[in-house]
Amino acid sequence: MRRGALRERARTDTRNAPPSPTEPRPTEPRPTEPRPTEPQPTESRPSESRPSEPPASAPPSVLVERRVEWTDTDAAGHYHHSTVVRWVEAAEAVLLHRLGLSHLFGSTPRVHFEADYRARLWFGDTVRTELRVTKVGSASLHYAFTVRGEQGGEAATGRMVIAHSAAHATGSTPWPDDVRDLLGAAGPQQPELLTTAEAPGGTPCASQS
């Protein structure tokens, strides 16, 4: 057989031969988009009601509102310095009454009083006196006070100290435990304002109308 015929036959065999198996190529992992996580159903639990915590204890205080009466003024036309003493003691009376300690009247002599006068108050002005307990001793009680005029500015500030002396006692007497607890942690009390204050005899005063 001729060489040319052999070459032509070899080409034909190559064309008719079945394709040789090829090795599979490794598939590269395709990046997948993260699926949004669906919220899993949770069992509904009955809400537990927790008892509200009691407010932190604070020393007692009170706000009392009054007017500068004509008898409170002096020759200069503004309030006399001694008027502050009466306003402070009026606030003390309201505070002890609010605390249920009115029985202490007559057994709490004053042992110290001081005041700084900062502004004038005139006849007819509305006055607010804030009295607050600052210290409870074994047989004493320390107050601080602030007197403010109609515009809210300070007219007088100071402090007062009283002692507890039981009836017929020759000296001071320790506070009873229940009284001491109230004086130390009763907190702010309801104010006594001109619109709510009752005049002696239960009828409103002309200055409060």
Image: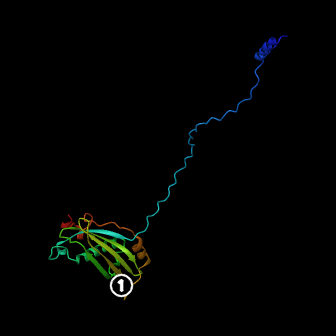
Q: Position of residue 8 (x, y in %)?
A: 78, 13
Q: Residue at x 34, y 72 (%)?
A: 132
Give coordinates of residue 205: x percent, y percent. Answer: 20, 67
Q: Nearer the viewer, residue 197 or 40?
A: 40
Q: Within 10 angstroms of label 1, few (less than 14), some, or many (20 or more) residues?
A: few
Residue identified by numbered label 1: 167
Q: Is residue 137 above or below residue 61?
A: below
| Residue 207 placement: quadrant | bottom left
Q: Residue at x 29, y 79 (%)?
A: 114
Rendered residue at 37%/78% (across/down): 141
> Above or below — where is 173 with respect to 192?
below
Q: Secondary structure at mark 1?
A: loop
Instruction: Quarter of the image for the N terminus: give it.
Output: top right
User: In the figure, is residue 152 to the left or right of 138?
Assistant: left
Q: Residue furthest left?
A: 75
Residue 201 position by quadrant: bottom left
In the picture provided, is 42 more to the left or to the right than 172? right
Would you place residue 106 above or below residue 17 in this image? Answer: below
Lateral position of residue 179 relative to residue 159, left or right: right
Q: Amino acid at mark 1?
A: Ala
Task: Find residue 144 and report its image quarter.
Answer: bottom left
Along the viewing direction, whichever of 28 and 95 lies nearer the viewer:
28
Q: Residue furthest bottom?
A: 170
200 shown above or below 18? below
- Quadrant for the C terminus, please: bottom left
Report the label total. 1
